[in-house]
């Protein structure tokens, strides 16, 4: 039988644990492997480690995600595109393919905007143009994903993420160095410039900063081509420029991710960061397994960078998932570490297959099982809110 003093101690322990469990998540890192299905992850693990389940984020597998858009049932492949999927994750609402975070020409507030209102810093990082569909889903509102100029304008005049890292379109489409500078962003174009600026951000200051890294035209170079192109080249398709990949001067995705974390983590209210491995999808569209695997491995390197930054923090949630599967990939044979696996591509388009979900940190267990991509928004809102979204706002979202 417990004594009165023991009961009192137990009572306070229970209260304390309850307070700890109810603490809001301070930092959220959402990592999206564009087009990265279960088989893409398996292929990269086979090549990189010789067996399944060895990518660093696979340790934190939670379940899978359904990805349909509002009108994907009308498509022959029943598949979402990146615009509708990013919108679902960013807003908790289904929209038609090609639409970016709006309905009936009215904007839908995104998780980035909600968390900005809570005083959090925000950032978008990608290996494709920064005005591409996935980052745009979090920081813009347009009726068509190809409205790159309007997406850039939304970034610069409305949502204003603190960090914008990625590529840019040629010929002034979308974001440009001039536009970013006119929008009062500090602009960097090389790894060294990026690190110099980030190192100058005062970690003890709450002064607001805006940093745009526009590193390469059209899209960042292929990781495979940088390492193996001179030895085992892959023929260029009609959309590729033939430029020599130059990761000697521009940052890899993992380096952009580390720099973004260094820049954002001085905010006392925390931050929201979206990181996209955008070229996993492009390699899948082309059915080129070598490029697909190397983009997936660099995406995994980026997760390692986030995990290293997080250390033993108990205030951070890290989510890894995909917007959709691309290519209908099936791994046929593991040919040991360092050798490309035998694979079968069933398509050159997106598919309606479920995609994997991984999560680590505070609130990670909320993602267990089979969830819809709209649930990602709702769970993040729940975990970062004290209290959660008001009932009136939730009715609008529903």
Image (tube, grey):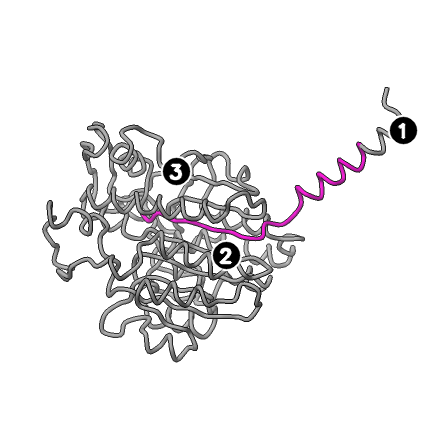
Kindly check if marks 1 and 3 are in contact, taking CB atoms under 8 A apart as contact: no
Q: CA distance from mark 3 to mark 2?
A: 21 Å
* Residue nearer the viewer, 167 or 370: 167
Q: Nearer the viewer, mark 3 or mark 2?
A: 3
Kindly give the residue lying farthest to the right in the view shown: 4
Q: How far across and down, in percent of the image, does residue 78 sit?
A: 32, 44
Residue occupied by mark 3: 56
Q: Which residue is mark 2?
A: 272
| Residue occupying the point 14% across, 62% down | 241
- Tag 1, which secondary structure? helix
Left or right of residue 390: residue 2? right
Q: Is residue 94 left or right of residue 132?
A: right
User: Where does the image place residue 101, in percent across and percent down from the top left?
Assistant: 44, 61
Residue stretch in magenta: 10-34
- Give the spatial CA distance, label 1 vs label 3: 48 Å
Closer to the camera in the image, 144 or 71:
144
The magenta stretch spans residue 32: yes
Q: Which residue is mark 1?
A: 4
Give the crowd class for mark 1: few <14, some 14-19, many >=20 residues within 10 Å.
few
Decide: few, some or many residues near mark 2? Use Cα within 10 Å; few <14, some 14-19, many ≥20.
many
State the residue at coordinates (24%, 37%). 329
Residue pushed farthest top? 1
């Amino acid at each position: 039988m417990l004594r009165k003093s023991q009961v009192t101690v137990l009572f306070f322990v229970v209260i304390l644990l309850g307070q700890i469990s109810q603490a809001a998540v301070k930092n959220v890192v959402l990592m999206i492997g564009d087009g990265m299905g279960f088989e893409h992850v398996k292929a990269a693990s086979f090549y990189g480690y010789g067996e399944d389940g060895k990518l660093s984020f696979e340790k934190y597998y939670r379940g899978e995600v359904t990805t349909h858009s509002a009108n994907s049932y009308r498509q022959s492949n029943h598949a979402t595109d990146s615009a509708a999927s990013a919108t679902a994750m960013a807003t908790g609402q289904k929209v038609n393919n090609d639409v970016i975070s709006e309905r009936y020409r009215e904007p839908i507030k995104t998780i980035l905007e909600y968390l900005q209102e809570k005083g959090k810093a925000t950032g978008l990082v990608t290996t494709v143009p920064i005005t591409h569909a996935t980052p745009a889903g979090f920081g813009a509102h347009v009726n068509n994903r190809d409205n790159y100029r309007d997406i850039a304008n939304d970034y610069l005049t409305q949502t204003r993420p603190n960090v914008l890292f990625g590529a840019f379109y040629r010929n002034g489409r979308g974001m440009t160095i001039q536009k970013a500078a006119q929008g009062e962003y500090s602009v960097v174009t090389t790894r060294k410039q990026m690190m110099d600026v980030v190192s100058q951000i005062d970690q003890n200051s709450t002064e607001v900063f805006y940093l745009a890294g526009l590193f390469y035209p059209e899209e960042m170079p292929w990781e495979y081509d940088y390492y193996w192109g001179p030895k085992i080249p892959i023929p260029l398709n009609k959309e590729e420029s033939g430029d020599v990949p130059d990761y000697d001067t521009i940052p890899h995705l993992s380096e952009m991710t580390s720099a973004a974390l260094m820049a954002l983590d001085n905010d006392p209210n925390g931050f929201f960061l979206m990181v996209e491995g955008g070229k996993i999808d492009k390699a899948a569209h082309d059915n080129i397994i070598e490029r697909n695997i190397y983009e997936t491995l660099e995406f995994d390197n980026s997760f390692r960078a986030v995990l290293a930054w997080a250390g033993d923090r108990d205030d951070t949630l890290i989510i890894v998932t995909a917007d959709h599967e691309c290519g209908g990939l099936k791994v046929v044979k593991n040919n040991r570490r360092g050798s490309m696996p035998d694979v079968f591509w069933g398509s050159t388009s997106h598919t309606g297959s479920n995609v994997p979900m991984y999560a680590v940190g505070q609130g990670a267990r909320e993602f267990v099982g089979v969830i819809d991509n709209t649930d990602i928004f709702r769970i993040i809102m729940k975990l970062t809110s004290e209290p959660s979204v008001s009932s009136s706002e939730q009715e609008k979202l529903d």
